[in-house]
Every structure is written in C-alpha cells, then in structure tokens.
Image (cartoon, helix red, strand yellow):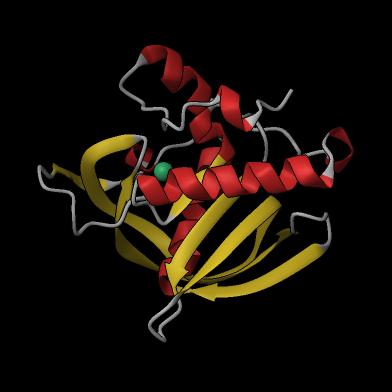
Amino acid sequence: MVKKKEEHNGRVLIHSLPQEEAVLRSKAKEFEFTELSLMEIRDLVVHMRSVMRKARGVGLSANQIGLPYRLFVAEVPDGHGSTKFYAIFNPKLEKLEDKELMDEGCLSVPGVYGQVERYEKLILKGQDAKGKPVKIKAWGLLAQVFQHELGHLNGELFIDKAKQLYEVVAQESARKK
Ligand SMILES: [Zn+2]
C-alpha cells in the first residue's frame, strides 16, 4: 500500500539508523498504475516534490520516504535560469556514455560528500504520472541525478562506490539528492 500524504511526516530516511537503512537497502518494486487513482498518484508526486524542496535536494526517490516503488522526482537547473521538474515512474537507463568523477551528496547520508564515477550522458526511459512512456536525453547534473536515484531504487547508496568521502558541516551550497 502506498501511504497517503497525511500519514507521512515528510522526513527523509537516513542510513545511519539501522531500521531506516534496511528500507534504503531494499530494491524497490515496479510501480503499478492500477493500484492508485490518477489523483492519488498526483498527490504522491506533489508530496515528494515538497519533501525534496524542503530538504533542498535535487532528487528524491520514493524509498527515501519509505515507499517501496520505482519512482523518483528530480528538479535540476535547466541552464537558462530556471529549473525543470521530473517525476519518473519505472525508470531505466540506456546508452550510457563517457564516465567521469562527479561530486555527490545524498539526503539520506547527511553531511557526507564524495566523488562518484558517473556516466556523463545517457537516455532515461520510464513513465510519467499518467503511465505514458517518456524518453529523456540527459547529460551533466541531470544524468548524474538520474543515476543516483536509480541507485536508490536498486537499494544502493552513493557511499558504496564513492571515492574520497568527506564530511561537510555547512551544507548550504552543496547539492543533495
Ligand atoms: Zn540520495
């Protein structure tokens, strides 16, 4: 069952609490569009966007708030002074190209950053909030966020493969996913 908005307090699960890490370490299951009404799905997306924004993240996967579904939201600068919001259901990555080391942090691992090898370019396929297929060509930060969130949905955390992990006290300027 999907928790209703009012049943979730808006807190992001963190890996340092064993019970919460167990949830973060579980592979999320396919999202079935028949289980929820379009209104419930819309409410869920709005809720996840609000949790992500309050936490100042650029991405949030459903299992980071305890929902075991293959769904994430992301909001990334579009290079023209505004941001673009994404809500992707049942995502898959294709045509991964050009690996490079990127700085990364995570809302579920507060205060810790590191360098992770990510693909610079990729194509994301999945479904939108109505179940319609989507295909997004992504590079740079957006491609990084997509890979980070896919990791969450597979029960992985960026610290698993990060190099040179470091702690930061002031997090204001850093991007978190
Ligand atoms: Zn994360």
For image coordinates 66% across by 55% down, the residue present is: 88
Looking at the picture, how far across and down is residue 102, in whole percent? Answer: 31, 62
Q: Residue furthest left?
A: 169
Between 90 and 79, which is closer to the camera in this rendering? 79
Using the rendered view, name the quadrant where residue 63 is placed. top right
Q: Residue furthest bottom?
A: 80
Between 6 and 138, which is closer to the camera in this rendering? 6
Describe residue 83's horizontal placement relative to residue 3 as left or right: left
For image coordinates 61% across by 32% down, the residue present is: 5
Looking at the picture, how far across and down is residue 64, in whole percent? Answer: 49, 34
Q: In this view, does 89 lie above or below 119?
A: above
Looking at the picture, how far across and down is residue 15, in whole percent? Answer: 36, 26
Using the rendered view, name the quadrant where residue 86 is placed. bottom right
Looking at the picture, how far across and down is residue 3, in whole percent? Answer: 65, 25
Q: In this view, does 173 lie above or below 21?
A: below
Q: Is residue 27 visible?
A: no
